Image (cartoon, rainbow, N blue to C red):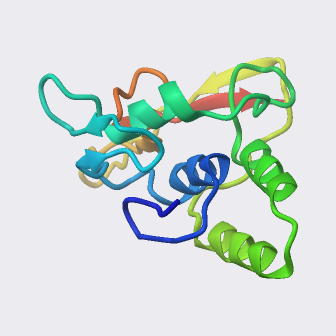
Amino acid sequence: VRCPVCQLPGLSPPLLYGHYSLCHVTEPGPDGTCPLCPQVCRAGHGFTPFARHLEDCHAPDGLDENQDGHISAEELRNSMKKMVNTKAAKKNLEEMFRASAVTIGPEKYAAYAWLVVRRPSDGKYLMVLESAHTSGCHGKPRYWLPAGKCD
């Protein structure tokens, strides 16, 4: 299977899911037929965006290793490492990881924090870019105030 965005070849369905989640979360989804099934994906009224379709129909089982309800970049990388067995595939996977702008998530913590940062010079706020795969993003990346697990 080829990635419909960058045309990276040789991806299994779980590797396509991981690759797209790590490397293309800030890009608009491609229009066209899903490379894994006959579903037509488009970002328009009456269609399902590719990111939403990939999440709903092709997300591999068992990605949430620590069962916290969130699939971290580390969990995604770990599942992808288990799927490759040749030297060339492992090299390609490492290049994919280096290309990813996603950081490895923290360990499981019991508390959460919400941070509001405002620059005094112009009054602008610090925002976080959230993946199109995140619940509530409706298939496209969104911006939020920084929040998350803390110790």
Give the residue drawn at x 38%, y 59%: 4
Q: Position of residue 129 (x, y in %)?
A: 43, 45
Residue 143 as seen in the image, left or right of residue 78: left
Looking at this view, is 145 or 5 the one in front? 5
Q: Position of residue 26 (x, y in %)?
A: 39, 53
Residue 23 as seen in the image, left or right of residue 69: left
User: Compared to 1, does 45 lie above or below?
Assistant: above
Q: Position of residue 8 (x, y in %)?
A: 50, 71
User: Compared to 88, does 42 lie above or below?
Assistant: above
Give the residue drawn at x 67%, y 77%: 95
- Residue 44, by quadrant, is top left
Give the residue drawn at x 48%, y 23%: 135
Label count reads 0
Q: Quadrant of the C terminus?
A: top right
Q: Position of residue 118 (x, y in %)?
A: 38, 42
Give the residue drawn at x 77%, y 81%: 88
Regarding residue 144, the answer to whether it shows in the image is no
Regarding residue 138, the answer to whether it shows in the image is yes
- Residue 71, by quadrant, is top right
Looking at this view, is 71 or 81 the one in front? 81
Looking at this view, is 2 or 77 the one in front? 2
